[in-house]
Image (cartoon, helix red, strand yellow):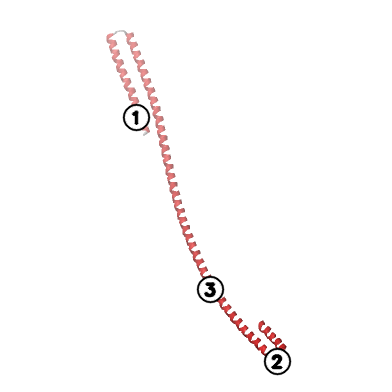
Amino acid sequence: MAIVVVIVVVVLEVAVVVAVVVVLVVVVVIVVVIVVVVVVDVVVVVVIVVVIVVVVIVVVVAVVVILVVVVVVVVVLVVVVVVVVVMTDVNDYDDDDDDDDDDVDDYDDDDHDDDDDDDDDDDVVVVVVVVVVVVVVMTVREDVNDDDDDDDEEEEEEEDEDFEYKLTLLVGQVISAASHGVRNGVIYNMLRGGAVIVTRLSN
């Protein structure tokens, strides 16, 4: 596109120069014809021709200078446009890369979210398992405590019964010893009864 613009500008400038030269040549020819027809003096004709040629040269040089300036300006503008376009493309490419990076970051965030969800699920499972284990342990412990309490109660009942039995037997022995003491002598039976009591208590 930039090359096309430069070519068009150059063609237009060349066309302008050619048109100016043609117009000046036509004017010179007309003036020379008029002078030759009206004034027959050769010196006057030469002066007029020289002046016209100088004017033509000045005009052509001016047009060429203008052409060069215009071409330089157009080239600079084209370079600026190309640089801007290239930078825009580069920025667009960078933006695309940034968008891709953002997509990757979003994907990573989604993965992290999934991992967090998995971790949360694992935590929930662990909590449930711990609760179940605690409940089972408490239940078993209560059952064991209940069994221990039952065993303790049975042992206490057996000890009470054994104590009552020994106490009853001891009372009977004391009564028997007392009756023997009454019949056979107080001191002997007291010693015997004491020995019996000590023997029973030791058993």
Residue at 61% x, 84% y: name it: 168
Residue 182 position (above or below residue 130): below
Q: Quadrant of residue 13?
A: top left
Q: Nearer the viewer, residue 138 or 101?
A: 138
Residue 34 appears left or right of 102: left
Asked if the residue under mark 2 is in contact with the one under mark 1, i.e. CB atoms within 8 Å, the reply is no
Residue 147 position (above or below residue 96): below
Asked if the residue under mark 2 is in contact with the one under mark 3, i.e. CB atoms within 8 Å, the reply is no
Residue 124 appears left or right of 51: right
Expressed as whole percent of the image width and height from the top left, the position of residue 19 reads: 31, 22
Residue 28 position (above or below residue 197): above
Q: Which of 130 and 22 is in front in this view?
A: 130
How many marks the image carries: the answer is 3
- Mark 1 closeness class: few <14, some 14–19, many ≥20 residues within 10 Å: few
Sequence-wise first label, 3 or 1: 1
Expressed as whole percent of the image width and height from the top left, the position of residue 11 reads: 34, 27
Amino acid at the residue labelled 2: Asn
Residue under pointer 2: 184
Residue at 63% x, 85% y: name it: 171
Expressed as whole percent of the image width and height from the top left, the position of residue 104 reads: 44, 49
Number of the label disc, if any, that sits on residue 146: 3
Amino acid at the residue labelled 1: Val
